[in-house]
Every structure is written in structure tokens, then in C-alpha cells.
Image (cartoon, helix red, strand yellow):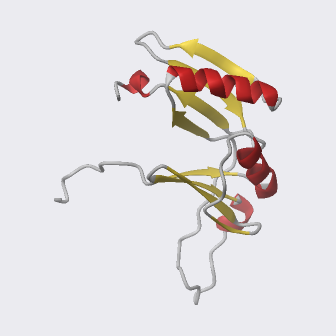
Amino acid sequence: MTASSSPTRVLETVLYARDLGAIEDFYRRVLAMEPHAKAEGRQVFYRVGDQMLLFFNPVMTSRALADDAELPVPPHGAEGEGHVCFGATSDEIAAWRQRLAREGVSVEADFQWPGGGRSIYFRDPAGNCVEFAEPRIWNIE
């Protein structure tokens, strides 16, 4: 790789939520996802294939860590609603829609993209916009 190469994949996606307990319950109950790692009140991490979905509590992560912290990660945080999209086939999207209905989760939008492919959108407890979409909406197979 050279310095002029562009990135080849996304390793982490980060969303922010103050109530990580509600996030953990929602993602376990509704999406059948188990935490990969967590630090109570600060963060919860999920493995999604070969990528990571991270939830940070912005109240905690926007503050600098002590100078002698084991992992000197710079502070970062955001307020407001984020977005994540999980890839799924058309049949999987139909099954997810049924599961969301059983769990009492409202689907905000369900449509076919003009270039092909379907997406459904709903919200997690922090208000983040969660999507399931066919990868072909981005010409990815």
C-alpha cells in the first residue's frame, strides 16, 4: 500500500447513545446481536461480520482520559441521530420486517430504490436511523 492508496473497507461504525442499557436490550431483543465487548456506562461493541458497530455514550467519550490512561484514545462524541445500514437480501428484508412488527418496532419507510433494491428504515432507542438494504442499491453484490 502507498500513501496515495484509498481505504479498502470500513472497520468500525460508531453511533452515540446516552442509555447504553436500552441500546443493549434493543439490539439483543430485536436484532439478536450480542455484545462483543463493553465498558458499563461508556461503550458497547458489536461484531457484524468482519466489521464492528460501536456505541459510545457521548457524555463519557467526549471527555479526555487521564494522562496515564492505558489506551490514550482522543476524546470524541456526537449528539443527535446517526445512521447505520445492514446489508440484506430481499427475502431477509421481508423477514426482518416481520420480526420488527412482532417486536413492536415501527418501520418508518419501506421502498424500492429507482435503480433497484429495497430498503427498510426504523429507529433504535437513541433515535438512530437503522436500515436494512439490498447491497445492490450501491451496485454491490
From what the image shows, is residue 9 above or below residue 30? below
The quadrant in which the C terminus is found is top left
Kindly identify the residue that appears in the image at 60 percent across and 38 percent down: 83
Nearer to the camera, 29 or 10: 29
Q: Position of residue 3 (x, y in %)?
A: 19, 59
As drawn, is 97 to the left or to the right of 68?
right
Q: Residue furthest top?
A: 114
Q: Position of residue 47 (x, y in %)?
A: 54, 55
Kindly identify the residue that appears in the image at 68 percent across and 45 percent down: 32
Kindly identify the residue that appears in the image at 62 percent across and 41 percent down: 82
Q: Position of residue 36 (x, y in %)?
A: 60, 62
From what the image shows, is residue 44 above or below residue 10? below
Nearer to the camera, 35 or 39: 35
The quadrant in which the N terminus is found is bottom left
* Quarter of the figure with residue 102: top right
From what the image shows, is residue 24 above or below residue 136? below
How many numbered markers are drawn? 0
Q: Residue furthest bottom?
A: 68
Q: Position of residue 109 (x, y in %)?
A: 66, 18
From what the image shows, is residue 19 above or below residue 43? above
Kindly identify the residue that appears in the image at 56 percent across and 26 percent down: 92
As drawn, is 30 to the left or to the right of 7?
right
As drawn, is 123 to the left or to the right of 93?
right
* Quarter of the figure with residue 127: top right
